[in-house]
Image: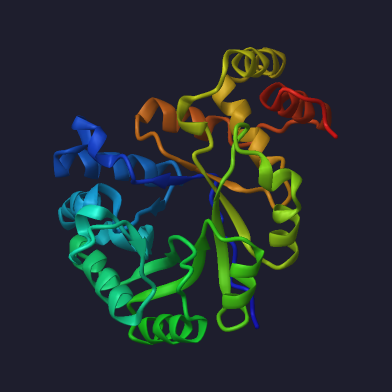
Amino acid sequence: MTTPDRLDTPLLLGMMRLNDYPELADPQGLLGFIERCVERGLTAFDHADIYGLGHCESQFGAALRLQPALRQRLTVIGKADIVLKPQDRSRWQVKHYDTSAAYLRRAVEGSLERLGIERLDGFLVHRPDPLMQVEDLARTLEALQAEGKIGWLGLSNADPLHWRLLGEALPLRCNQIELSLMAQDAAWDGRLQTMQAEGLQALAWSPFAGGRFPAGLQQALANVADALGATPNQVALAWIRRLPGAPVPILGSLRWSRVEEALAGASLALDTQAWFYLAEAARGVEAP
């Protein structure tokens, strides 16, 4: 089975918190932000149907409608299968996952309508579903591809057995995982090497751990930043890129100053000792 090409970008921009930025609430303001990103070579935008209960997609779509030609320069990624409590129409009102054909078709078509586009360039299964029927899911995704509604495929938060099962039926490009100095497990348990060996590109969500770096780690980041003439945030992203497969960080902040800072540090490289120094500062223990 042919492995799809890698996403060639220094960063992805995550749209989960789009509603948190008043300056981007106006379609014209968001359009200007998107255009600035494209000018800097940042063209991949990571969406999901649950972000803002669909409002983030609608907001992004309203901006694109002001400049339809811009769509051709963007990579728009969508995700689905998580159903939050407010979206559950059953009597149980429970968060759950749904990889049924009927649900995924409604989710994809809903995302396309809100975004005002004809196709998601990439589509990811958002969370492993314990009730997933692999053959049914594969047929559903193949049908959506054949209809031109989705492009390449990937997974999010998947472990090896999950991606191997679906990968036997479909070519998968990537797997989004939580990865940061505060979420290091994939760096130590072999998942990243396995993904690299099996042709899956790693995309790292929450690369700054939601801003929850403890004081000791913040000081270690500052020490390395001073030594390299960089900023602590640039160093934290470089720590991720130093890992096998050079994972691509998904930036959750949409402040333009944070985006520029991240782009300016995209070529920063850490040596082995600096990587382990930071890993130890975050974990609180030496390497095994």
- Quarter where residue 202 is shown: bottom right
- Residue 7 appears in the rendering: no
Q: Nearer the viewer, residue 162 or 217?
A: 162
- Quarter where residue 224 is shown: top right
Residue 92: x, y in percent?
Answer: 23, 61
Residue under the point 75% across and 56% down: 193
Residue 10: x, y in percent?
Answer: 55, 45
Horizontal relation, residue 114 to residue 233: left or right: left
Residue 163: x, y in percent?
Answer: 60, 69
- Residue 24 appears in the rendering: yes
- Quarter where residue 281 is shown: top right
Looking at this view, name the residue that lies furthest to the right. 288
Q: Nearer the viewer, residue 117 or 278?
A: 278
Q: Nearer the viewer, residue 56 or 254?
A: 56
Residue under the point 22% across and 37% down: 24
Residue under the point 31% across and 39% down: 17
Quadrant containing the C terminus in the rendered view: top right
Looking at this view, name the residue that lies furthest to the front. 92
**Residue 113 in the image: above or below residue 237:** below
**Residue 216 in the image: above or below residue 41:** above
Horizontal relation, residue 280 to residue 255: left or right: right
Residue 5: x, y in percent?
Answer: 59, 68
Horizontal relation, residue 26 to residue 75: left or right: left
**Residue 214 in the image: above or below residue 205:** above
What sort of colour scheme is used for the picture? Answer: rainbow
Quadrant containing the N terminus in the rendered view: bottom right
Residue under the point 46% across and 60% down: 127
Q: What is the tally of numbered marks visible in this picture?
A: 0
